[in-house]
Amino acid sequence: QVQVVESGGGLVQPGGSLRLSCAASGEVSSIHGMGWYRQAPGKQRELVAGITSDGSMTNYADSVKGRFTISTDNAKNTVTLQMNSLKSEDTAVYYCSAAPRIGSPYWGKGTRVTVSS
């Protein structure tokens, strides 16, 4: 089992920045990669950014490329999403997911990000 806990959400003005953190615990050696997803009201959950467990590969949604950066600290079993130049359309609940090599991904409970003036 793997436990995933997000932190760092909040209210920010357009153009501002936020940093989200995701801490994984438990059987972390089984994790192949981790990712950040988001779900805005009335919309489906979508992938924002993903990273392999060794940090060698990343991928981003087109809507956040150049603005968001995902990184991993294996020593701390954490994944960070640095979000810059935030827009109102980035408003959503952000979820962290840990994908094991075998089986279904583990999900956190989410952290809310609101971009508003």
Image: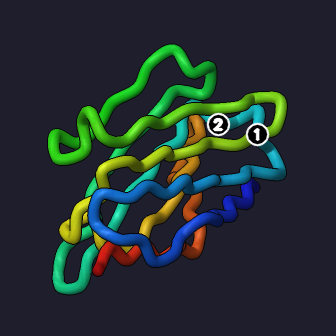
Picture residue at 72% right of the left edge, 52% below the top: 23
Picture residue at 48% right of the left edge, 36% below the top: 70
The quadrant in which residue 41 appears is bottom left
Give the x, y percent position of residue 94: 44, 66
Picture residue at 73% right of the left edge, 50% below the top: 24
**From the viewer's perspective, is residue 41 above or below residue 44?**
below
Left or right of residue 100: residue 68: left
Give the x, y percent position of residue 84: 37, 47
Q: Amino acid at mark 2?
A: Ile
Left or right of residue 15: residue 101: right
Which residue in the protein does label 2 denote? 31
The quadrant in which residue 99 appears is top right
Specify the farthest residue to the top: 56
User: Residue 77, labelled with which disc?
Assistant: 1
Give 70 or 5, whichever is nearer the viewer.
70
Give the x, y percent position of residue 39: 31, 71
Q: Amino acid at mark 1?
A: Asn
Q: Quadrant of the C terminus?
A: bottom left
Say which of marks 2 and 1 sits in front.
Answer: 1
The quadrant in which residue 75 appears is top right
User: Residue 11, labelled with which disc?
Assistant: none
Picture residue at 29% right of the left edge, 57% below the top: 15
Marks 2 and 1, Cα distance to the nearest angstrom? 10 Å
Q: Residues within 10 Å of mark 1 (few under 14, many from 20)?
A: some
Secondary structure beneath dot 1 equals: loop
Give 104 or 51, whichever is nearer the viewer.
51
Secondary structure beneath dot 2 equals: strand
